[in-house]
Image (cartoon, rainbow, N blue to C red):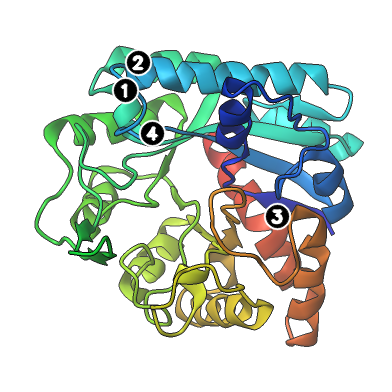
Amino acid sequence: MRFIDMHCDTISELYQDHAKGGEASIRDCALSVNLDKLEMGGCGLQNFALFTHLKTAGDSPFLYCLKLADTFFTEMRANQERIGIVKSWEEIKKNWDTGRMSALLTVEEGGVCQGEGAYLRILYELGVRMMTLTWNFQNELGWPNRRVEEAGGQVHYETDEEHGLTETGIAFVEAMEEMGMIIDIAHLNDAGIWDVFRHTRKPFVASHSNCRALTPHPRNLTDAMIRELAERGGVAGMNFNKAFVMRQPGGNGEEMAYISEILAHIRHMKQVGGIGVIGLGSDFDGIPNPVEFGDASGMQLLAEAMERDGFRTGEIEAVFYGNVMRVYQEIL
């Protein structure tokens, strides 16, 4: 069974390797996502995020993002016989029907635009078709849920129901909806998420977010958010980060993420919003922990586990690709 993964940080890892003089390739690198592993796992389409850390990207986060994009294009051109860059539903459908893997370019951190609509339009022309409004820092568009650093270096997160989208943030979501760039509410704070609902009409996604009712981490979605996202026709991608799937937050975040934990979030999200709101957003190469089924090559083990857990074939297909395809068909 083929799958669509809405989020990985592989390009950022490759860029960092190349910056240090390395020669890692998307073809067969040692990361959780490479072309060999994607093919083994049955990938139909992989979203590749240009993850930009505002605190370490230098004076121009936009320029840093463009350097990441250069890595993406270089890697894809070198392997175009196996994977094709897609910018539209028609291109996705063509590759899907011929069995060729697709690569969709996304941005993780709307702050790369520095509040400039021109930068957003440039990213669209480059082929970016999905963008998170924030990462873990406040930017010109809005706020994440609060990241609090404690004495001793410990970090915890708090929900923020006070700061909604800025005026610029509202203008951005309206522009993204108009141009056909999918809005991604992953990492956005609670108040900002509700503002996205208020200021948009079309489906959007939480590319790598789970259920807060099961794992009370502010990066996860509340049941109310899941219901509204389902009503809108959007999708939330199951994240394999241990911190977002374990029952009780704690530990060092490096323990294994078990299939049983991921299944629990899929079951809960189905109960709250229906099977149509669930997709996959692994966060491979951006998470510190191992996953029980390994890496992208082991995705069929998750499908088999869903079948053993009582999910029907049509439901598994919906989670693995159908629901995300529906959103892409409507927006792209």
Q: CA distance from mark 2 to mark 4?
A: 16 Å
What is the quadrant of the N terminus in the image? Answer: bottom right
Q: CA distance from mark 3 to mark 2?
A: 30 Å
User: Would you place residue 74 above or below residue 1 in this image?
Assistant: above
Instruction: Look at the numbered discs 3 and 1 and tell me whether their residues touch, using CB distance below 8 Å.
Output: no
**Which sits earlier in the primary sequence, circle 3 or circle 2?**
2
| Residue 113 disc label | 1
Q: Position of residue 310 (x, y in %)?
A: 74, 87
Quick one: SS at disc 2? helix
Would residue 147 be found to the left or right of residue 93 on screen? Answer: left
Q: CA distance from mark 3 to mark 1?
A: 30 Å
Residue type, numbered disc 3: Tyr
| Residue 321 disc label | 3
Location of mark 4 (residue): 177
Quick one: SS at disc 3? helix
Q: CA distance from mark 1 to mark 2?
A: 5 Å
Q: Position of residue 147 (x, y in %)?
A: 23, 57
Q: Are there few (<14), some (14-19), or many (20+) residues within 10 Å of tag 1?
A: many
Q: Residue extending furthest front?
A: 152
Location of mark 2 (residue): 119
Q: CA distance from mark 4 to mark 3?
A: 22 Å
**Which sits earlier in the primary sequence, circle 3 or circle 1?**
1
User: Residue at (35%, 15%) from the top-left corner?
Assistant: 119
Residue type, numbered disc 4: Glu
- Near-viewer residue (205 or 142): 142
Instruction: Look at the numbered discs 3 and 2 and tell me whether their residues touch, using CB distance below 8 Å.
Output: no
Q: Are there few (<14), some (14-19), or many (20+) residues within 10 Å of tag 2?
A: some
**Which sits earlier in the primary sequence, circle 4 or circle 1?**
1
